[in-house]
Amino acid sequence: MPDDAAISANAQTDSPLARQATWLSQYQYGLRLSEQGTVISVGDGIAWITGLPSARMDEVVQLEDGSNALVFHLAHDRLGAIILHQTSQLIAGTQVFLTGKRLSIGVGNALLGRVIDPLGIPLDGTGAISFSASRLLDVRSPPIIARDFVAQPMYTGNKMIDTMIPIGKGQRQLIIGDNGSGKSTLAIDTVINQHAKDVYCIYVLIGQKRSTVVNTIETLRRNEAMTYTVVVVAEATAMPGMKYLAPFAGCAVAEAWMAAGHDTLIVYDDLSTHARSYRELSLLLRKPPGREAYPGDIFFLHSRLLERSTRLSAKEGGGSMTALPIIETEQGEIAAYIPTNLISITDGQIYFDRQLFARGFLPAIDVTRSVSRIGGNAQHPAIKKEAGRMKLDYLQFLELEVFTRFGSRLEASMEARIRRGQLLREILKQDLLTPLSVEFQMAWLLAYNEQLLDNLEPEQVKASLTHLQEQVKNASIHIDESRDQWKMLVRTWLK
């Protein structure tokens, strides 16, 4: 055991005065060069700065008052910076210093269950977060040689999507439709459905009202989804720079888990607001406007974000990032500038129709305008086989239904097909926040294809499916069981 004298000597060595004396004894005079800039104007979340000729794009600069900003525009005599953190003392004339650092965010499992802003600062009031690593917000997407084929299904728990518009792990599937048509609800359902599936979820809320943010977080908490989810928030009152950075922050968090070999799901809610915030920043920084006043690189902005979602090869760890970007249309105008940009970037879209919503068909997904260009390759073979027959019946029904509007008498065979189509439409309806298991999807598909539900009236469908769902939940059958085994059990359950 050390004696008291040794302990006293160590305490003196570790004291602040001792450390300061050591620093002074080792200090050497020398020439040091540093750049110092000056803020010439501040407003709308933007700072104009002069005197930093060595500043680089996306470099963080430190201001004398304690604020910091991100270099976003370089001109011949000044630079424009996005203010990340602003104090009340920030005024014109404040000194600015280079840091040589790029913007990064803390990543890792410590984020699970937390609500953060795009800089990684917690917003949930439950204490600071201890990060073991950090990651740059904006990096290059994985090269082609580091990617693998999409071969595993990402189940959403939605009847229509898991059967007719399937999504695979590593896919980018756009959710598009008018405001208030159910887009965010579908995304939340998908997050809730990842319970016990070893998928880390990131939900990015961009420019949403505080009430919407609180409702989303409470819904996730109520359904025990926050244990595997992190929520990144840049609410409507945030500065435009924070709304611009929010999706990149969420992507960096997901990318860290993907690089570690995990499957991740990220929701961008929504990229319409993100595009508008980027347009606002660009106009404030006097960049030349393009179509609809959006800057010319708006396509590049979203493509470099969404290209980071992929499935990595086994050599790179085999992780995946599935992206569900949400985009808002106005009066169903799918051919607008930003929606067409994102349709061309992503691997398919799920289109929500306002008219279907008004008629009470929920979720209001228009199958005729929705497509998945990759997910079918990742769909389970049994589901794919059963869903193919069902989808053909449904599309034929939508065409034949037009004839019923004329009120003329139809052939018996056509009437039977229309009746089955109406039955299928009732089957496809689904309540909010009720994601369904893949085993139940198999059960109702087989019941429909084997005409085990044909004797039901439309008002009896919901009760029959609820009974079938309970039976599937209590049974131990797996999706990989033979079709004959499934058919026998479904017949028994529906007697």
Image (spheres, helix red, strand yellow):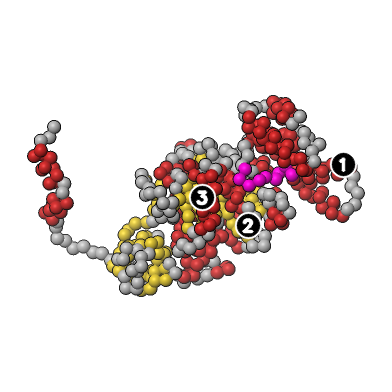
Relative placement, left or right, of 344 versus 141 is right
Relative placement, left or right, of 495 versus 432 is right
Say which residue appears at 13% left-offset and 55% top-offset.
Answer: 24
Residue 116 visible, this orientation: yes
| Residue nearer the viewer, 481 or 306 | 481
Q: CA distance from mark 2 to mark 3?
A: 18 Å
Relative placement, left or right, of 343 versus 9 is right
Q: CA distance from mark 1 to mark 3?
A: 50 Å
Question: Which numbered disc, 2 or 1, marks the residue closer to the eye?
Answer: 2
Question: Which numbered disc, 2 or 3, marks the residue closer to the eye?
Answer: 3
Please give the residue where the numbered disc 3 appears in the rendered image.
217
Q: Callout 3, which amino acid?
A: Ile
Q: CA distance from mark 2 to mark 1?
A: 39 Å
Q: Callout 2, which amino acid?
A: Gly
Residue 100 in the image: x percent, y percent? 32, 58
The span picked out in magenta is: 426-434
Per the rendering, the mark at residue 180 is 2
Q: Residue furthest left?
A: 5
Q: Callout 1, which amino acid?
A: Ser
**Alpha-carbon neighbours of circle 1 within 10 Å: few (<14), some, or many (≥20)?**
few
Element under disc 1:
helix
Please give the residue where the numbered disc 1 appears in the rendered image.
413
Marks 1 and 3, the one that precedes in the sequence: 3
Marks 2 and 3, the one that precedes in the sequence: 2
Element under disc 2:
loop
